[in-house]
Amino acid sequence: SEACSSVEVAALAFAKEESMWSATQFISGIQTLHESSGMPWWASIVAINIAARLVTLPIMLASQRATGKMARLQLELLPVKKLQEAMTLAPTVEHQRAIHSAWIAQSDDVKVRLGPDIAKIMGTMF
């Protein structure tokens, strides 16, 4: 139990060190804004919160855009996935070949329509 709590304390300390903005930096920013502007505490807290959200807004928008593109891409690839699953369940080689040719045609259609978008999506995600 004591070893577990020391591991938790070490993990929390590491997380605090690795975070981009620590709580002490936010508190320092609130104090600085409060003292330099004469704003009440509640207004300083609101102002710092709004500033932090504005700073992270471009990251949030890019993330939402990439998530939307991935959702659309997943819907487009659903028929290809179903054909691939059907091919593994096909009872004969002839059935497998027919499904495979349908799968290739569907895959090529998706590649033609979404090929450039896939690179863009991966570029915005990573």
Image (cartoon, helix red, strand yellow):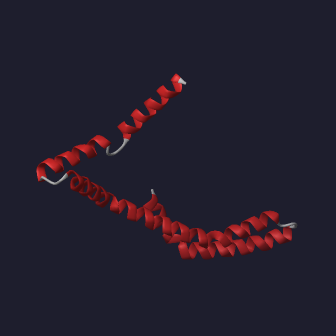
Frontmost residue, 38 versus 92: 38
At x 58% / y 72%, what residue is drawn? Answer: 111
- Asked if residue 90 can be seen in this view, the reply is yes
Which quadrant is the C terminus positioned in?
bottom left
Occupied quadrant, residue 13? top left
Frontmost residue, 80 versus 105: 80
- Asked if residue 119 can be seen in this view, the reply is no
Task: Answer with left or right where residue 62 lies relative to residue 51.
Answer: right
Occupied quadrant, residue 96? bottom right
Where is 106 relative to 67, above or below?
below
Instruction: Indicate the position of residue 67 as horizontal and vertical percent values.
Output: 49, 64
Q: Residue furthest top?
A: 2
Frontmost residue, 109 versus 78: 78
At x 67% / y 70%, what residue is drawn? Answer: 80
Task: Answer with left or right where residue 105 lies relative to residue 89.
Answer: left
Where is 7 relative to 40, above or below?
above
Instruction: Indicate the position of residue 81 as horizontal and vertical percent values.
Output: 68, 67
At x 28% / y 59%, what residue is drawn? Answer: 50
Instruction: Indicate the position of residue 64 as horizontal and vertical percent values.
Output: 44, 65
Which quadrant is the N terminus positioned in?
top right
Frontmost residue, 46 versus 63: 46
Task: Answer with left or right where residue 126 lies relative to residue 25.
Answer: right
Instruction: Indicate the position of residue 102 as horizontal and vertical percent values.
Output: 73, 75
Q: How many marks?
A: 0
At x 59% / y 68%, what residue is drawn? Answer: 74
Where is 63 relative to 79, above or below?
above
Where is 31 relative to 42, above or below?
above
